[in-house]
Image: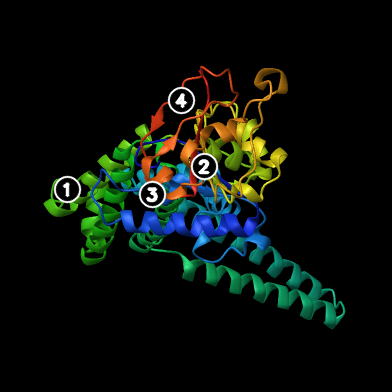
Amino acid sequence: MLIENQRTVTCAPTNTAVAEVASRVLGVIEESSGGGAATKCFFGDVVLFGNEDRMAVDRKLENIFLDTRVRRLRQCLMPITGWTKSLSSMIALQEDSMVPYERYDEAIQGCVLDLVSEEIKLRNVTVVCSLRTMDDKKVKEMQKDLLEVQKKAREVEREKMSFETYFQSNYKKLAKDLRTCVETFVDDLPRSATSEENFCCMAEVLLLLDAFGVLVQSEPVEQLQALFKRHSDVRFRLREAISSCLRKLWLLSSNFKLPEMYDSRTIDLEFLLQNAKIVLCTASSSYRLLYMQKAQPLEVPVVDEAAQLKECESLIPLQLPGVRHAVLIDDEYLLPALVKSKSRLTRGRRSAWEWCRPTRARSGHRGEAWQAGVLDARWVVLGEGADRGRVPGRGGGRDHLLHRAE
């Protein structure tokens, strides 16, 4: 379904059963990761949701579990601390670091001047108080305050960063933030959220950021200052490295647009569930998918252990908007008539489920029947002349297909 780009909701009766299905799906995706581009599947296209405790979500299932995925993505989608802010800050840092450093230097000097003014004021007050023969205890307290101000002023001057330290400190922090966001997007972002070119561009940006960071540490500070002052004597490899990095950063800034989201409900319902290709949940909890107004329809519900479901539960995923086919998985002798035709339409004829069972299966020749394929069936039996075309598929006694009438 992933390869064919079919949106699918996969259900089971219990959280435990859903977790088992999810583990098998992850195994298939991991196997496909070694294949070519045409057969490659991604974790970001699969979402699992339900009761975390009852599913016993382990480290492996956390890769696709909705709640943990929302927590990871939320950090990257926040407007103040997320991807957009980190990307714009890195561009500003690489385009001209001298201006922000000059502001930083002015702020440090202003802080030192304020402390010096406070020191002078305290010194004068201490002298006046001592001349007026005030309490020695009061004078000692004022002298202690004076020493604290002097100590703080020295610490501010000592901790002031040079331009090289300032640039490398900010660069490392922003590069780390961008790497965290890119790794989160690669693992958790549905592929339909942006183009494949943007995913490739993000991977290239990480390589360029690492290369430029190593290069900056090996170059003298004079070269770094000359680079941002646009001097002509900058070494070619340094100028070329920052130019390549900026081109990719600007490309992402222009083409990779993500919504700024604050609350978890917006991320899971309006972003992840709307863009996922495979959604795994219990049949009863699939009602949440009814509220996705702008999403592409989930065309194929797959119900595992379908015979264990109550009929009212099995109807929930089958009533999702846009459903065209349904795959029911279980032993055909255990499956009841999951989708019953209205009595006024069937007039005593077989139910929709019975229609999809081959005649030879009803006669007891199970193996021969399912080797021949699975028959197509209507949601509602329209009459004895209803068209039932054979659907090619693999034999076996567990897979059954229902087809919605146009």
Cα distance, mark 3 to mark 1? 34 Å
The label shown at residue 388 is 4
The label shown at residue 240 is 1
Could you tell me which secondary element the residue under label 2 belongs to?
loop
Q: In the rendered structure, which amino acid carries the disc numbered 2?
A: Ser
Residue under pointer 2: 363
Answer with mark 2 or mark 4, whichever residue precedes in sequence.
2
Cα distance, mark 2 to mark 3? 43 Å
Answer with mark 2 or mark 1, whichever residue precedes in sequence.
1
Answer with mark 3 or mark 1, whichever residue precedes in sequence.
3
Q: Residues within 10 Å of mark 3 (few under 14, many from 20)?
A: some
Looking at this view, is 208 or 221 the one in front? 208
Mark 2, mark 3: which one is toward the viewer? Answer: 2
Q: Position of residue 148 (x, y in %)?
A: 66, 74
Q: In the rendered structure, which amino acid carries the disc numbered 1?
A: Glu
Cα distance, mark 4 to mark 3? 35 Å
Could you tell me which secondary element the residue under label 4 belongs to?
loop
Q: Position of residue 331 (x, y in %)?
A: 55, 51
Q: Name the residue located 25 percent from the left edge and 45 percent from the top edge.
A: 37
Q: Residues within 10 Å of mark 1 (few under 14, many from 20)?
A: few
Direction from residue 136 to residue 77 in the image, left or right: left
Answer with mark 4 or mark 3, whichever residue precedes in sequence.
3
Mark 4, mark 1: which one is toward the viewer? Answer: 4
Q: Name the residue located 60 percent from the left edge and 31 percent from the top edge.
A: 292
Looking at this view, is 403 or 319 the one in front? 403
Q: Position of residue 115 (x, y in %)?
A: 61, 62
Looking at this view, is 33 or 352 the one in front? 352
